[in-house]
Image: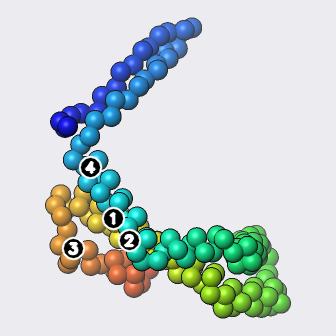
Amino acid sequence: MGQGKTGTLGVCFSARGVVYCAAKNIFMSTKVETKTRELCEAILEHLETGGIKRRIDTFLADADARGQYESLMNKGQALQEKQHAGQTLEPAEISAFETDRDALLKNSVAAGFLDAQEEMHDLQHLVNKHVNKTIELGRVPAPEDLESSCGNHGGGGGCGCHGH
């Protein structure tokens, strides 16, 4: 299978001064596309072997854990909206949220799901960081290129990494 360019075949016509085009993309394999597919396969393998997928599937199959999680997320959203609107949060509201959060974290299925979510986020961040740094530097980054205030998730803020 040869490597080539991605091309577009199109048919265009004009109606009332507006040009309309119907295009059909022709997909041809490139090295980047092939390596991206390999990376995606490696990520899927990691999700399977690291137990991430199992923990997510277990959570999705547990209606009680899902309900507990959704309830907590809704309460958190309501508190955030109230605070954003400049309203004072009542101590009882905060206490009720914290009690529900603690109960959720004691639920092993929900806690496993939250850990799996964090691991997926970390994996996504790692891949994005490597790709972005490669494009920025114009070469494959060395380990020291990846070290920064954001890179090790110990960031002291202000780095634009949204807490990472």
Label 2 sits on a secondary structure element that is helix
State yes or no: discs 1 and 3 in contact (Cβ < 8 Å).
Answer: no
State yes or no: discs 2 and 3 in contact (Cβ < 8 Å).
Answer: no
In-image side of 157 versus 136 (left or right): right
State yes or no: discs 1 and 2 in contact (Cβ < 8 Å).
Answer: yes
Relative depth, front residue between 27 and 57: 57
Can residue 80 be seen?
Answer: no
Which residue type carries mark 2?
A: His
Q: Earlier in the sequence, mark 3 or mark 4?
A: 4
In-image side of 7 versus 107 (left or right): left
x%, y% of residue 155? 40, 82
Label 4 sits on a secondary structure element that is helix
Q: Earlier in the sequence, mark 4 or mark 2?
A: 4
Name the residue located 33 percent from the left edge and 34 percent from the top edge: 27
| Residue 89, above or below 131 | below
Q: Earlier in the sequence, mark 2 or mark 3?
A: 2
Relative depth, front residue between 105 and 136: 105
User: Mark 3 sits on what residue?
Assistant: 145
